[in-house]
Amino acid sequence: MCGLQPTIIPLRVGAKLPSNLDKPGAPMEFYAPTSISIPPLGASRIPVGLHVQLPERTELVLQTRTNFQRRGLTVTNPKMTERHELTILITNDSQMEQRISRGACLVRGVLRKAQPQ
């Protein structure tokens, strides 16, 4: 954990700010802005309605939630290194349609110093 925090700007009415913004270095949870259905063996790109500005030389590492892993869901964009609207790409590796409710926690994000390429 690097002790810095990103600047996060809501882009849409109803976009929920991540938890722990007031605690530098703490993991942040990002939430679904609407209900989402992901077809079997499919994927969904979910814009969370927040513009994220990262401090210089940092990256936001996105971690799949344990309850999603149990359902066959995986976050396939594991880190963010640029400044733009945060979009979460989730794949469904199961044989069943998976639903994510509005307001559900999509990912946990941890800010850290950027790793050299």
Image (cartoon, helix red, strand yellow):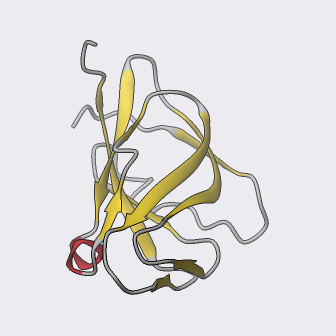
Is 22 in front, or is 64? 64
Is residue 11 toward the left or the right of residue 9 in the image? right
Q: Which residue appears at 79% of the width and 67% of the height?
A: 13
Q: Quadrant of the N terminus?
A: top left
Q: Which residue appears at 67% of the width and 66% of the height?
A: 15
Establish if 71 lies above or below 23. below
Establish if 56 lies above or below 99. above
Location of residue 3 by image quarter: top left
* Residue at the extreme top: 116
Number of numbered discs overlaid on the protein picture: 0
Image coords of residue 82 (percent x, y): 52, 27
Image coords of residue 109 (percent x, y): 35, 51
Establish if 70 lies above or below 15. below
Location of residue 12 by image quarter: bottom right
Is 60 in front, or is 94? 94
Location of residue 113 by image quarter: top left
Q: Which residue appears at 56% of the width and 50% of the height?
A: 87
Image coords of residue 60 (percent x, y): 38, 38
Q: Which residue appears at 46% of the width and 25% of the height?
A: 55
Is residue 20 toward the left or the right of residue 110 in the image? right
* Residue at the extreme right: 13
Image coords of residue 93 (percent x, y): 31, 69
